[in-house]
Image: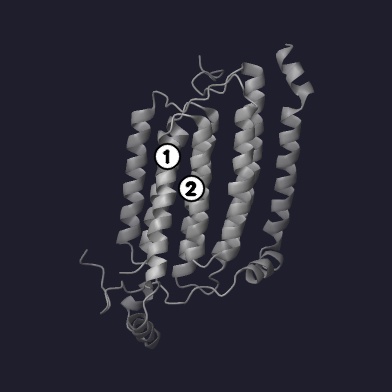
């Protein structure tokens, strides 16, 4: 705890400010003048959305019916989209609603209704206790690292709008990953169709 | 009182752990997939939080990375759920305890 120097208003100093410099003192002055995200609306929105997200995720674990678990999962996805909005990530928030709350949830529901004689329960296997221990260990480790690290905090305001910058980056700096992603989506789509087409199962079951 | 990077990182850590527990402990194959989707969400939330708060010359690169993660997650979901349906047709169950072909 003692190795985390703080500025006068309690923020942690950013990493480059451990050595004094003109830029550093400028950063510290700006950090002292304006704190990030301290208006009441943002704080309330964050706590409500965080409670919805984590509570719905716990609901996915606790609820005994698989369909209800999917409904809680959708609620958790929507909560994460709200958290994106508090982070001024408008494009990612809309993408989250469209793809996760829309497409992925429907895919999961389809997988449930296409397996009608499967178990609709949401029980755990015998690995419940080791999994719980490992999950708690991971949560404490990640939380400890998150709190204990001196992140190089910037005092930049929220983004004005992100879609055009993301679009330019996708077609300029990240054009190769962008094209590979389209090939990946094509391969995944073809793979899904080939896997579930009826002839494939006739061969499998007829052996 | 204000909302800082650490708050978002801790929400991400808790969400990731819940997803990890689901993926490891659930008996139903679809439950395992739901856990994996939750873990993707936690990682994306962490990316966006770092993109918002941390000093960087190109802060929106984090958002671009999130878009790619969502793409790969969608591809993964489609393929894995097709596998679940195929498994159900062949073995008549999606209980991961009873899918033990490789066990001797």
Quarter occupied by the N terminus of chain B: bottom left
Mark 2 / mark 1, whichever is N-terminal:
1
Residue under label 1: A59
- Marks 2 and 1 sit apart, C-alpha to C-alpha, by 9 Å
Q: Is residue B35 visible?
A: yes
Q: Which chain does the numbered disc 1 sit on? A: A
Q: Quadrant of residue A136?
A: top left
Image side of residue B67 versus residue A12, left or right: right
Tags 2 and 1 touching, CB below 8 Å: yes
Residue B25 position, x and y percent, is 43, 30
Give percent across and percent down for residue A78.
52, 52
Q: Report the chain holding disc 2.
A: A
Q: Residue at x 69, y 58 (%)?
A: A178
A196 sits to left or right of A133: right
The crowding category of the residue bearing disc 2, from other C-alpha atoms within 10 Å (few below 14, some 14 to 19, many at least 20), is: many
Q: Disc 2 marks which residue?
A: A76
Picture residue at 35% right of the left edge, 35% below the top = A132
């Amino acid at each position: 705890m003692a190795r985390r120097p703080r500025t006068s208003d309690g923020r942690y100093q950013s990493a480059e400010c451990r050595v004094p410099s003109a830029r550093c003192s400028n950063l510290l002055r700006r950090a002292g003048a304006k704190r990030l995200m301290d208006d009441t609306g943002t704080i309330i929105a964050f706590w409500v959305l965080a409670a919805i997200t984590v509570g719905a995720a716990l609901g996915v674990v606790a609820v005994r019916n698989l369909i209800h678990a999917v409904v809680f999962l959708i609620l958790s996805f929507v909560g994460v989209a709200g958290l994106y909005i508090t982070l001024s990530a408008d494009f990612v928030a809309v993408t989250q609603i469209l793809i996760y709350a829309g497409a992925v949830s429907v895919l999961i529901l389809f997988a449930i209704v296409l397996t009608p004689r499967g178990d609709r329960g949401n029980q755990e296997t015998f690995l419940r206790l080791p999994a719980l221990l490992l999950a708690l260990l991971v949560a404490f480790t990640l939380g400890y690292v998150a709190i204990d690290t001196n992140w190089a905090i910037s005092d930049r305001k929220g983004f004005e709008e992100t879609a055009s910058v993301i679009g330019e980056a996708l077609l300029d700096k990240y054009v190769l990953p962008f094209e590979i992603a389209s090939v990946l989506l094509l391969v995944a789509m073809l793979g899904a169709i080939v896997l579930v087409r009826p002839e494939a199962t006739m061969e499998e079951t007829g052996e | 009182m204000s909302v800082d990077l650490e708050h978002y990182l801790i929400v991400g850590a808790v969400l990731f752990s819940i997803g990890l527990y689901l993926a490891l402990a659930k008996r139903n194959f679809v439950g395992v997939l739901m856990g994996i989707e939750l873990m993707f969400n936690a990682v994306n939330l962490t990316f966006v939080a770092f993109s918002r708060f941390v000093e960087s010359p190109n802060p929106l690169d984090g958002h671009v990375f999130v878009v790619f993660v969502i793409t790969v997650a969608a591809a993964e979901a489609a393929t894995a759920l097709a596998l679940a349906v195929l498994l159900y047709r062949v073995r008549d169950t999606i209980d991961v305890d009873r899918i033990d072909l490789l066990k001797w």
